[in-house]
Amino acid sequence: MGNRIGAWAWGLIFILAALPARAQKYDLLLRGGQVVDPGSGVNARWDVAVSGDRIAAVQANIPPSAARQVVDVSGLYVVPGLVDLHMHVFGLQGHIAADPNALPAGTTTIVDAGGSGWRTFDEFRRTVIANSKTRVLVLLNIVGHGMVGEPYESDTADMDPAKTADCILRNRDVIVGIKTAHFAKPGYTAIDRAVEAGRLAHVPVMVDSHIFSNSERSSKDDLLVHLRPGDIHTHMYNDRQIELIDRFSRKVQPWMWEARRRGVLFDVGHGGGSFLWPVAGPAVEQGFVPDTISTDLHAESLRMQQSNMPNVMSKLMFLGMSFEDVLVRSTVNPAKAIARYPELGTLGVGRVADIAVLEQETGSFVFKDAWPAKRLATHRLENVLTVRAGKIVFERRPRPAPAQDATIYDLLIKHARLGDQSEADLGIIAGRVARIGRGLKAAQARVLVEAEGYRVLPAGLAAGAAADLQLLDAGQVIMTVRAGKVMTDDLGLTIPDVSRAGPYSNYR
């Protein structure tokens, strides 16, 4: 009897000890953030709980005691892991590693856009896809050798629709479409063979097709004759791959609207050469926004434009799109374009726990386009934390709060001598002197004047005064400013932010 009581007592102790562990039914809890999930229609201050590699609950006030790990994300956006439809992690000279470039940006799924073809895909799968924490999907190049430069990429003999389709059908778990790019010969052979392979394999085609005059191609025929509904034209805000904006009227070309009505999709594909302010600005203003947002991230664009997903999303918000609008084009829409929604692109309960936590920072930030012309913005998105398949794979280290000075000067005159011969910077906004002081940031100026050693008149210039002034060198006027605009500049001291459109200067 005593032994039985002892066994019962030990069993009770074991049960009581196990109760706290059983109460922790979640592995991870992201608590207190603004959950924005366009796919589920959620935009609320809720919590997100994860069990294993799946979303277990999305609701208000989940008790912290219910989770083994709790992360406070108050004041931040909790969104589905970003889906980048156009990145380069294989084949292309200058391709980059997926994990260190995608995961810190909140991008949990990337699509390699044409790096491999049917001849090289097995190597890609073995060496990159199998060894990446990032989910790496593939647009298979219609060229069997993949994106390895000339003469391969213009070799029509290596564009085999049947072998391309067969490779896709044998690897549908990771191949989601076809890519054609960089075809340097005249005509539509590359596009037509890619579309034929897409028809055989029942997948979409992404097109990067140059429209130079010697190509014997036009955007109108690309979009209205050769592409199918659901096919994707990337580099939409360039002027070499697609003629979106008429260079003289600044209006969206009428056949672009027609192509959109047909169901052709338009993708950003920012990259190092495919996002121009004089194209993107008027297009967004007229309502021709992307269907999908992507980076075309590779070594060059990573170095110069820093065009990861939050960067490209921020630029489009700067041009007038809302956070919700850019988010749906970075999650739901790309997942749908490759037939992976709702497996990807949502925080729906039961779906894979791919999550990004974004912060909207306030300050003065420089955004560059492809040439690169600078634009100044007061807000940007930055990724703070990334969850991939239920595991935290990136977490930004604590850092001092960013400076909240969001001042943007129309004109900044640096290091000028004032009437008392002291040196100072003059920040001008809307035709008036907004600030006089030292150390005003050049990065916060639309136009910069380096005036070291030159004197400013009038001598009694003060903050709030009209910005009508002159710069003098030994008594001679070398620059005239009226209402905050540089009217004359004899010595070339002005450093403007000039927008160009490729080799063209005829954008009005």
Image (cartoon, helix red, strand yellow):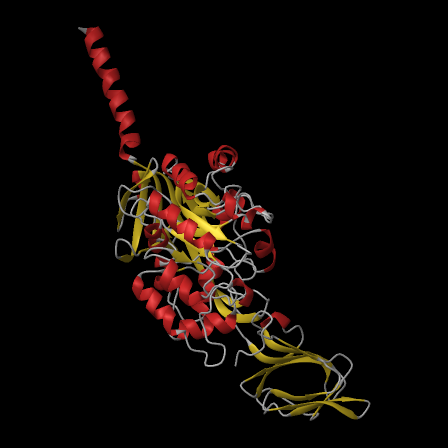
Q: Quadrant of the N terminus?
A: top left
Q: Nearer the viewer, residue 150 or 289?
A: 150
Q: Measuring from the top left, give residue 67's x and y in whole percent.
A: 33, 39
- Is residue 285 rendered to the left or right of residue 298? left
Q: Measuring from the top left, give residue 301's x and y in whole percent.
A: 57, 56
Above-or-below relation of 140 to 488: above
Above-or-below relation of 493 to 319: below
Quadrant of the rendered structure where residue 76 is? bottom left
Residue furthest right in the image: 474
* Residue 291 seen from this side: no
Residue at position x 48%, y 71% in the image: 279
Above-or-below relation of 375 to 173: below
Quadrant of the rendered structure where residue 228 is? bottom left
- Is residue 327 rendered to the left or right of residue 116? left
Q: Measuring from the top left, give residue 309's x and y in whole percent.
A: 46, 56
Q: Nearer the viewer, residue 410 or 246?
A: 246
Q: Nearer the viewer, residue 472 or 96?
A: 96
* Residue 124 seen from this side: yes
Q: How many marks overall? A: 0
Residue furthest left in the image: 1
Q: Nearer the viewer, residue 255 or 162?
A: 162
Q: Measuring from the top left, give residue 12's x and y in whole percent.
A: 23, 20
- Is residue 186 rendered to the left or right of residue 21? right
